[in-house]
Amino acid sequence: MTFTKFVCWDVERVSRVMGVEATQTADSIFLATHHPIAMYRQELIEVPSRVPYSEEQFLKDFLAEKDFAFVPVLGSSGTGKSHLIRWLAANIESTQQRRVLLIPKIGTNLKDIISLILEGMAGATFDEYRQRLNRATSTLTEAQAREQLLNQLAAAVGPNGRGDRTKLSELEDYLVGTVDSLLYDPFFREHWLKDGGIIHQLVIHILGHRDTVEIVEERRQFSLDDLPLNVLDLQKAGERSREFYSCLIGNENIQKATVDWLNRHLDEAIAQVLSLGREDLQRLMREVRETLAKEKVELVLLIEDFAKFQGIDREVLEAVLARPQQAGSKSLCAMRTALACTTGYFDGLRLDTVKQRITFSVNLDVGTVGKQQSLVNYADIKQFVARYLNAVRLEDKIIQDWAKSRNNEDSDKATLSSACNECEHKLACHAGFGEADGFGLYPFTPEALEQMLSRVNPETFKPRILIKDVLKWTLENSISDLQHGDFPAISLREHFGKMRLSAMVQADIKAKDQQNYDRRQTLLDLWTDSNELYDLHPEIHSAFDIPALGVNVQPTKVSPSVSQAKESRKSVNNYQVEAHSQTEKVPEKLTNQLQILDRWNNQEIFPQDIGGELRPLIYSAIGYRIEWDAEMLLKGSFAGSGTTYFKSRNITFYSPKVTRETISGVKLSFPLNPDDPDEFRESAIAFQAILQYNHYKHWKFPDGDRY
């Protein structure tokens, strides 16, 4: 059977394996797709020095501490922080002397977190906490919960609030007696309680349910945008709130102070909705540790996203940071905590005591893939991707049985089998598309992964983006196109952004293969790393049902084993690779200008400095091109220095999202039809020719005969 139009995955499995923003993946799939995470270790968060670190060493160091460890896992969103926490959970077993508590980031709210902390804790004290939690929340609808949170916040910020009111500034003292009027006012309550507002967001955080990842870079809290500041609402305000509202809408200092005052009391209001005050939460956490200490059990708390704890985060931190032995207090259990948190959210806690008690920290901002200072290279990306591709091809039972075998004490931790082993196309596929650890990369190649990832994730490596925007998107949207011989489709190129191929290469593709122009253009743009017209490996052309042109061949970056090389089909072994011809070096300025014009052809903005250089050249060429005498026109009247009809500045260049100034006289805009890609490309090539001729003063420059 020919290796063409072949699909070895389905949408359902892709969603189940790669749904990184949906429900928590099964443990077996998690283990099957896990690839060692690159990271740095820092002794102190604020010290810039850091050293490369491995997950195995992290696990060893985390468990080596005698009775206390506190390790924040930091980094920007999408870098794999929660994945690392889950990996720790998979490698630290609960025993009679150790309780491992994993708090997942998906499908949990604040109430769920407290319930998880109480889980397994026996006794009347803990039963009472459960009853209070359930009584407070089990009968609440979402609308009622919004009302209650707003009421609790109004009480907290007002004169009867629990905070210390003895050391307030004059402005804060003013807010104590006025801000609550805005929260209680019947007219403004509609604003505070609206769908999507900050109160609604916080209620979802406390009691709601999310099936998708919520990216939280900093604390959920009030901002200036959340305040009602419409002057037309002044007359609609109640009598008590009207005076304060009139001051609020016209005074930025009061606005900022109001936002700060509301945010200062948010945690208290959230705790009251759960029917557990902040003192109750501190007591709960301490009693959990005291009880476990009596049972000689250590607690390992692993938190996939610490932002989930907002409202009780400070109380939890205070409890987990307490050393087991403290003078004058009951003994607490040994405590190991690793929590994932964005750097911005962690900094927002502003707790110096936290930073002083950190054992060490881990940072997953590892740099751009392939760059000199990065901890991740494209060989790592191949291995990372291959495991996910293997998981979408294998049956669930095979993965589950493999995962179970790993837990057996006598298991040799065998690697997961490759779905490719049973495939009749294995040799052809691996020869053309490449593999890593025996797992095929089809329909990607190493070059395709590099091109695709660099466009959607040009900065510090974020595994979530690679999975979601490269692997998952491509696999889900390619099935029909592959089966019908339409892959790679234009939609794929559009998804990955602007093309990088030069205008001349695009013209070559158009000239040699008008029928498959769009597909071949996408293929060369994404599946190669060059800017020349190539045939790819024969098996790639066969798989995508796109004929080779008989031009130079660019080999796939694969490293086949000896046995694979011997068994590869004769048609694969016999293709020839021609060497690149050496061309004359082009001056740097001119090279940059030619590249800018290529990018313009690929829908980037046209820089004014190139326009300034091209205008007089084009203007002069137009003047020479017109046969003024034959047309019975006086050149000086239409294109002379004193005319207003047509000057050099009347020549303009189309640029996306740029509005041109109004020009009097004749306006000549290039290309004449910017929506015509052929005309756009021809204009770019013509401008490249003009600049090169102007530099060399002849047409014998590299490829000059082609212009």
Image (cartoon, helix red, strand yellow):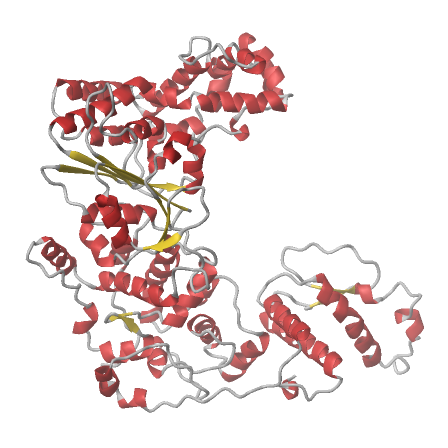
Asked if residue 240 is positioned above or below residue 2 in the image, the reply reads above
Query: Where residue 369 appears, x then y in whole percent?
Result: 42, 62
Quarter of the image that includes the N terminus: bottom left
Q: State the residue in front, 3 or 162.
A: 162
- Name which residue lies at 71% across and 67% down: 610
Query: Where residue 679 appears, x then y in whole percent?
Result: 63, 72
Number of dots carrying numbers: 0
- Name which residue lies at 93% across and 70% down: 637
Query: Where residue 525 appears, x then y in whole percent?
Result: 47, 72
Q: State the residue in front, 330 or 649.
A: 330
Asked if residue 307 is positioned above or below residue 241 in the image, the reply reads below
Quarter of the view holding residue 203: top left
Q: State the residue in front, 554 or 635.
A: 554
Asked if residue 565 is positioned above or below residue 495 in the image, the reply reads below
Q: State the residue in front, 707 or 163.
A: 163
Quarter of the image that includes the C terminus: bottom right
Quarter of the view holding residue 196: top left
Residue 485 as seen in the image, left or right of residue 56: right
Asked if residue 460 is positioned above or below residue 383 in the image, the reply reads above
- Name which residue lies at 57% across and 74% down: 502
Q: Determine if residue 547 is in view.
A: yes
